[in-house]
């Protein structure tokens, strides 16, 4: 919360603090909110939980924050550049993984991260915490499901690559990716559930068969950006 309030580029409509929330961090939150002329109200703890939908993680504080780069898939496709890279989350249910992927993709400069409303962890306190607040600035693209996203991206000229430990080609080979590329990251347990044009693997050593999906996402995102440079 302190990171959000300290970021002048983020628009915060209001902050709700539970009546029973105490501690030095609560005081800092109130001071920062007052400094930015943001409404900061003490409310019943149940009101905070009602908004956060996660009483175990909200720590008695919740904010109404506008994510300036969050867009619907159709809107994003209308203005997507001729050379663009998207990451599609397919059944990733661990909030920590989703948050770390958002942080890595944003840091790498990926054009969009498709976070479907179905089958993927909700963008709530756990995801935001795992992203270290970057989720508010991430280029998040919303649509109903990964399959809907793939269909729309393919129609818009994107070549669809699925990350797979047994992929047909290595991530670091010299064969170029399409100018418009979408990389699908499968779920922690189910893997890829959508049809892709080509599968891609990350070369591994010492008998290690695969990486955590968030770590793999970071490798892919920065390799794609390296190729652009």
Image (cartoon, rainbow, N blue to C red):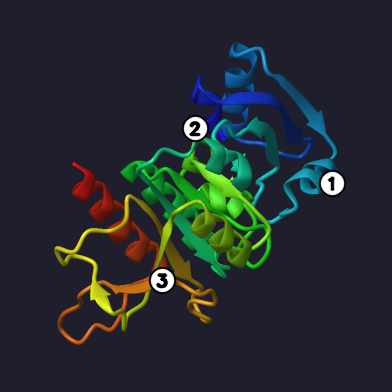
Disc 3 versus disc 2: nearer the observer:
3
155 vs 226: above or below: below
Categorize mark 1 by other alpha carbons within 10 Å: few (<14), some (14-19), many (20+). some
Seen in the image, is 88 located left or right of residue 29?
left
How far across and down, in percent of the image, does residue 92 sit? 54, 68
Q: Which residue is located at x 57 percent, y 20 percent?
A: 32
Q: Which residue is located at x 54 percent, y 35 percent?
A: 69
Seen in the image, is 142 located left or right of residue 172?
right
Q: Which residue is label 3 attached to?
A: 197
Quick one: label 3 or label 1, which is nearer the N terminus? 1
Q: Which residue is located at x 50 percent, y 51 percent?
A: 156
Quadrant in the picture for the N terminus = top right
Quadrant in the picture for the C terminus = top left
Q: Which residue is label 1 attached to?
A: 46
Cβ atoms under marks 3 and 1 closer than 8 Å: no
How far across and down, in percent of the image, does residue 15 sit? 70, 29
Q: Which mark is residue 16?
A: none
Structural distance between the alpha carbons of marks 2 and 1 = 24 Å
How far across and down, in percent of the image, does residue 222 sit? 27, 51
Q: Which residue is label 2 attached to?
A: 3
Indicate the secondary structure of the residue bearing disc 1: helix
Seen in the image, is 200 located left or right of residue 149?
left
Structural distance between the alpha carbons of marks 3 and 2 = 40 Å
Categorize mark 2 by other alpha carbons within 10 Å: few (<14), some (14-19), many (20+). few
Indicate the secondary structure of the residue bearing disc 2: helix
Disc 2 versus disc 1: nearer the observer:
2
179 vs 147: above or below: above
How far across and down, in percent of the image, does residue 8 sit? 51, 19
Cβ atoms under marks 3 and 2 closer than 8 Å: no
Quick one: label 3 or label 2, which is nearer the N terminus? 2
Nearer to the camera, 95 or 62: 95
């Amino acid at each position: 919360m302190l990171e959000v309030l300290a970021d002048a580029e983020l628009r915060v409509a209001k902050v709700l603090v539970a009546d029973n929330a105490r501690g030095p961090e609560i005081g800092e939150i109130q001071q920062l909110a007052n400094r930015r002329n943001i409404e900061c109200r003490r409310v019943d703890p149940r009101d905070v939980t009602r908004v956060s939908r996660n009483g175990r993680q909200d720590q008695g504080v919740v904010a109404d924050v506008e994510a300036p780069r969050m867009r619907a898939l159709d809107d994003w496709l209308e203005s997507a550049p001729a050379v663009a890279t998207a990451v599609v989350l397919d059944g990733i249910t661990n909030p920590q993984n989703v948050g770390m992927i958002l942080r890595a993709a944003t840091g790498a400069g990926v054009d969009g991260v498709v976070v479907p409303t179905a089958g993927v962890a909700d963008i709530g306190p756990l995801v935001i915490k795992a992203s270290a607040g970057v989720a508010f600035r991430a280029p998040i693209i919303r649509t109903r499901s990964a399959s809907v996203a793939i269909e729309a991206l393919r129609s818009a000229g994107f070549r669809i690559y699925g990350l797979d430990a047994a992929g047909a080609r290595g991530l670091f080979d010299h064969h170029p990716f399409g100018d418009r590329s979408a990389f699908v990251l499968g779920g922690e347990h189910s893997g890829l559930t959508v049809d892709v044009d080509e599968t891609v693997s990350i070369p591994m050593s010492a008998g290690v068969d695969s990486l955590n999906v968030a770590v793999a996402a970071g490798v892919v995102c920065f390799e794609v950006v390296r190729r652009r440079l």
